[in-house]
Amino acid sequence: MKYNEWLKRDKINTGRQMEMDLARAIPVMSLPFVHCVIECCSAETINQPIPFLFNVIIGAPLGAPIFIFSMGLSLVYSKHSNEDDIMKRGLILFIAGFILNALRFGVPYVIGYFLTGEYDKFIAPILYKIFGNDILQFAGLALLLFGFLKKKRLDDHVIVIIAFVMSLIGWRFRHMNFGIPAVNIIIGHIIGTEIPEGYVLSDFPIMNWFLVPVAGYIFGNILIRVKDKKKFYIPFLAMLGVIYWIYFAIESKMHFGKMAGGATLVEEENAYYHAETFDIISYIVCAIGMFGIYYIITSHCPDKLNRFFSSVSRNITRIYIIHWLFVVMITNVILYKINGTQELPVYQIMILALIIFLISYFGSLAIEKYKKKKILNP
């Protein structure tokens, strides 16, 4: 097939992309399950089939990486895609990340301490939890940096090179411990830091992960020019999807990259959060391959189901925030106070996660409806 038969120079494939909605919906729908598994599984049950599915497969390649990839892709389709708008949204997300940390960790941990008096569990890590880095802070920094680079009128290929070099640097200097808590917390937003106690929340440092939204942005600039998406996606689905899952199988068997493990759960998780460059590239490959799968799924889904995916995608930030408020309070405080442990049988974890998702989803719809009503009736 010739270039001009499936890819045009003008932006022709505009409007809402259902596969993008599904790519954003799946990670946020799985979040309560992933986080409840992490919080409530014992060391013995975390690697059982269902917890492994949510913690390692859905929670890793099919979760945050595809969401981060979609974040870059959505910049191409956004109505507010100029540099100033991108940087403004980045600043809002960065600040919102700390507000969420205070609400999801600070408040429950203070309550937990007053209920139990356990300093080491609730008070010792509280500053790390509030000021540490997570995906909202990463998203904010990524948008700020991307907007800045675009403001400097750098070509896309130059931005890709910068992001790739950043990934190499992040890989080389990950798992750092500077010996000073405040320094570990601050630097943890940039490169992956950790300490033996496991307090540092240094998830998705920008040096390691910036390449993923940049790749999503490049992919979006291709997708928006595609005339026939079926002919465009199927080769990617056949090639990149298979390549990634072969890589994942080899990685799991040989225990390298994100499957390298560690002496503690924190070290094991940081093999993922402080991703090496090969894993970052594999996540990009996986995202493109999965977009082909999501295109096929949404092409055959009833309109009602696709509208559900769209509503989840549209409310992704609200669902993310609401679910965290319930996960930490229920697992770390209520369960711990009642049972003396956060651990639950797997079937109870699944029930709890489903309830939290439903509360988060319908809560987000109520907020969306209220905001629309307020706009129409100021």
Image (tube, grey):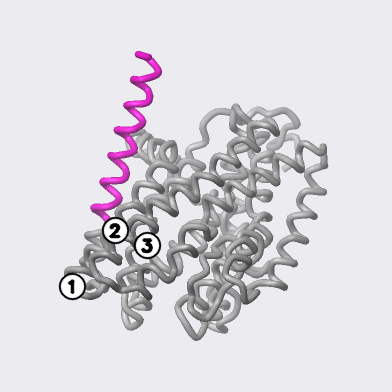
Disc on the earlier residue, 1 or 3: 3
Residue annotated with mark 3: 35
Is residue 252 rendered to the left or right of residue 184?
A: left
The amino acid sitting under disc 1 is Asn
Badge 1 element: helix
Q: Which mark is residue 339?
A: 1
Is residue 322 rendered to the left or right of residue 208?
A: left
Is residue 177 rendered to the left or right of residue 43?
A: right
Mark 2 burial class by Cα count in 10 Å: few <14, some 14-19, many 20+: many
Residue 368 in the magenta stretch? The answer is yes
The C terminus lies in quadrant: top left
The nearer-to-camera label among 3 and 2 is: 2
- Which stretch appears magenta? 353-378
Disc on the earlier residue, 1 or 2: 2
The residue located at (81%, 39%) in the rendering is 152
Quadrant of res 303 = top left
Badge 3 element: helix
The amino acid sitting under disc 2 is Met
Residue 145 drawn above or below residue 372:
below
Between marks 1 and 2, how big is the CA–CA gap?
14 Å
The residue located at (34%, 51%) in the rendering is 323
Between marks 3 and 2, how big is the CA–CA gap?
12 Å
Q: Nearer the viewer, residue 361 or 136?
A: 136
- Residue 250 location (% of width, % of height): 57, 78
The amino acid sitting under disc 3 is His
Residue 319 drawn above or below residue 289:
above
Q: Which mark is residue 329?
A: 2
